[in-house]
Amino acid sequence: VQLQASGGGLVQTGGSLRLSCSASGRAESDYIMAWFRQAPGKERTFVSVCASSGTRYYADSVKGRFFTSRDNAKSTVDLQMNGLKPEDTAVYYCAAGQFGIFTNDIYFPKNYDYWGQGTQVTVSS
């Protein structure tokens, strides 16, 4: 599976951005699709996840502001980010992994098999 993320950029506090990740190769619907982010000097952390069934989970820091969706027919997964804050500044990565059921494993980058190249999101204060 190859993943390509796009949509990052520079936005002011309170603004919005929409990230998109397109998948090619093995059927995207076989995978759980997630977004992670990594700020400079920090570890990569979980942002959101979406199964092909539509089940979604979010990090507490983004609940109510970020919304993830996927289109299995188009093999894309999006991340709509609203109410952006300076602390949201990071490189955002999409990832794909196979999980039999939802467990805490979905929150950890090491459990994902495929990664996109990352897209920079910068929120100015």
Image (cartoon, rainbow, N blue to C red):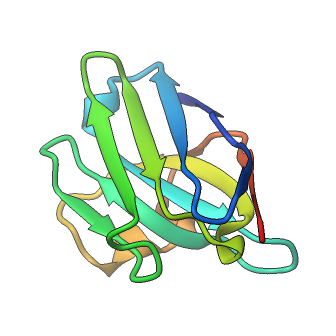
Rendering coords of residue 104 (x, y %): 32, 80
User: On screen, 14 above or below 69?
Assistant: below
Q: Quadrant of residue 115?
A: top right
Residue sticking out furthest to the left: 53
Total tally of numbered discs in the picture: 0
Residue sticking out furthest to the right: 41
Give 103 or 49, whichever is nearer the viewer: 49
Rendering coords of residue 84 (x, y %): 58, 64
Rendering coords of residue 86 (x, y %): 71, 73
Q: In the shown orientation, is residue 33 left or right of residue 51? A: right
User: On screen, 75 above or below 62?
Assistant: above
Q: In the shown orientation, is residue 77 left or right of residue 45? A: left
User: On screen, 86 above or below 23?
Assistant: below
Give 19 or 22, whichever is nearer the viewer: 19
The residue lying at 69 percent from left, 42 percent from top is: 8
Q: Is residue 71 something that shows in the picture?
A: yes
The residue lying at 36 percent from left, 23 percent from top is: 75
Q: In the shown orientation, is residue 117 left or right of residue 72? A: right
Q: Quadrant of the C terminus?
A: bottom right
The residue lying at 47 percent from left, 57 percent from top is: 82
Q: Quadrant of residue 78?
A: top left
Q: Is residue 31 something that shows in the picture?
A: no
The residue lying at 62 percent from left, 51 percent from top is: 93
Rendering coords of residue 2 (x, y %): 57, 27
